[in-house]
Amino acid sequence: MKKFIITLHALIRKDFTIERHTREIFLVMFFFALSILFILNFVLDTDIKARNSGAAGLIWIISVISGQLCLNQIMSLEEENDMLQSLLSAPIPLTAVYLAKTITCFFGMYGMTLILFPLYSVLYNVSLYSANLLWIAALGCWGYASLGVIISTMTIQTRMRDILLPVLFFPVIIPLIVAVVKVTQTVFTGETLNSASTWISQLIIFNIIFTTIGIISFDSLIKD
Amino acid sequence: MQITIPKKYIILDVFAAICILVSFILVMFFTPIEMTMGYVQKIFYFHVAHAWIGMLSFIVAAAASFMYLIRKNSVYDLIAESAVEIGLYFTIIAVISGSIWAKPAWNTWWTWDPRLTTTTIMAFIYAGYQFLRQSLDNPDKKGRILALYCIIGCISVPLTFFSIRGYRSIHPVLIGNTSQGMGMTPPMILMMIISIFSFTVLYLALMQHRFLYAKIKEETEAEKYEMEYEDE
Amino acid sequence: MINTTILQDTFEEPVLAAKNIRKKFGRMQVLKSVDIQIRQGDCIVLIGENGVGKSTLIRILSGTMKPDYSESLIVCGEDLFTSEKSRNKIGLICHQTMLYSDLSALENLQFFSRLYGINHEEEKINTLLDRFGLSLRKNDPIRSYSRGMQQRIAICRALIHEPILLLMDEPFTGLDEKGTKILIEVILEMKSQKKAVLLTTHDPNSMKALATKYIKLEKGLITGDAE
């Protein structure tokens, strides 16, 4: 167990060190999200009602779309120079690789989402502050990362690579997006979370299902 | 390569042809004409049958994928390949025919109804699967990756359905609670069953041919791969 | 007296013992039934035509590729596919450098030493880098290195956990003069320390001084002692 945590830590730290050197993943993703947020201005310009009611959906859609940049980058790191083979030859469980990738991607997504909420709030003059958002966003981002890493592991091994990720990923991530948007909306409208309990449980179930699939199946995805 | 279609395949082919022909004639000339919608309502018999095949095929593909992961027998991969391709066409036809039916029935081409939306998302997943199959090279890994995607899709689709089931729906409920249904008369129900049966037979007939095709294709591809490998 | 030492040698546990390995690609049976035994102090040179499956065999022996069937594949007394520990004993060098090109040499080696669970990593890394003449540029990203230097770090990477068995796929291709010299030194050292080396090469003649045995892979089978 201790060995597992050391491995996990080494793998995550390596991804963050690469990011510190290149700034190719999170920063690019963040600016992509920012530019969509600005483009929205031309749509939401005069429609104050849409700004309010659409906030949850819009913020999550921006996250979902920019998140795929992170997923693509994070996995193609391992494809370069045959790194997957290198990891396979090391005395580490492949589950650690999956979890490390999911955690790295989660941090990227989570950080971005936490910046997007107040930013949207400032730019569009909507009040969106709630402590509950912290864990709701965490659940949403973890689900996104856990399934996203599986799908991007599939797509980096294809000839089409990056192009294929959204085509394969978006149709299967829909239930998560629906649930997380619903819960976020409930928070925004100021209702109690009890009214969204089915959505929350769905969110949790989704997280459990896809993390489990990832843990079980990841080695069969990268082993030859 | 000499391609021969086994004789026994013809039995099912002929049976499927008869079934489809009979149900077509029955739908055209012997079913009652619905009062409000008129002739267009008859699309409904085919629409439901197609949607059913689309769903059945999805389950067949997921089951075959699951078996492939356990048994590692390429036959299951070929079954999944066949089921996905046929399922994709049937699902697309179901969505389009539903849309044609919806215009006179609900006075709109499209509605964000759970069933309609889920079926369309299923078609997206089918399509994604096809893209994935086209662009994977390594024959051993290909099967595993595809099988896993198929299973993920199969888990995701019902989740999607349940997550949007709460939305207001105007789609008729066929099975179960019929109070808000379309009030089908007994001949209509009978016709529906005949139609679903005929299309299932057609599905089986198509599957056997698609499977044969997949098998032949796999063999030729393996030969091609061998040659490439020797060149390396 | 002489007899007893020979007896001891033959009773020694082989570093790697593989029996009846089979691998298919599509329908092509690349490896039909491969048996290999590598003893301590061996330097086995694997030769064969291009595309005959040498790389595949190396990958299987390193545990990164699963064979379709294998009667046994034992590394230092442990099964390669069930025991993660056995991987600690194998060093692998392939065509690709297997290094993160955005990380520096030091960071790459630190990362791998953590994966292999090595203590006192700094010391070991610095000695290795010194030996391969890379200490001066250890903080630059690998991307900026020349091909020969990248190869040298790849060798460092394979040696960081002090493997007992070194598997190398065309190690001399693309290696500069300095690297070649050091690699030959490393192989000699491995031999003298009762460790083992298995390598493939295009040019079997250049290996005459080092090789203890030549084996040839042909039509999916190993034919021993080929020239």
Image (tube, helix red, strand yellow):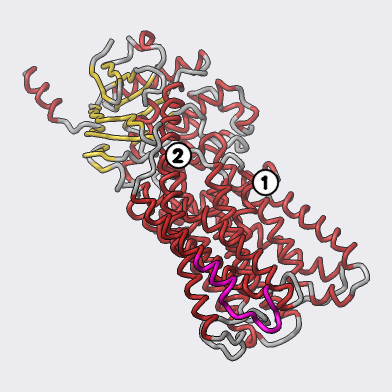
Look at the numbered discs 1 and 2 and tell me whether their residues touch, using CB distance below 8 Å.
no
Find residue C87 and report its horizontal and vertical position in percent: 35, 41
Q: What residue type is labelled 1?
A: Arg
Residue B157 visible somewhere in the drawing: no
Q: Mark 2 points at which residue?
A: B217
Q: Name the residue under label 1.
A: A20
Q: Which of marks 1 and 2 is in front?
A: 2
The magenta stretch is B22-39
Q: What residue type is labelled 2?
A: Lys
Q: In the image, is B125 to the left or to the right of A125?
A: left
Looking at the rendered structure, the number of numbered marks drawn on it comes to 2
SS for tag 2? helix
Chain bearing tag 1 is A
Residue at 50% across, 69% down:
A208
Reply above or below: C89 against C193: below
Residue at 61% across, 41% down:
A160
Find residue A133 and report its horizontal and vertical position in percent: 69, 74
Q: What crowding class fits label 1: few (fewer than 14 Cα within 10 Å), some (14-19), or many (20 or more)?
A: some
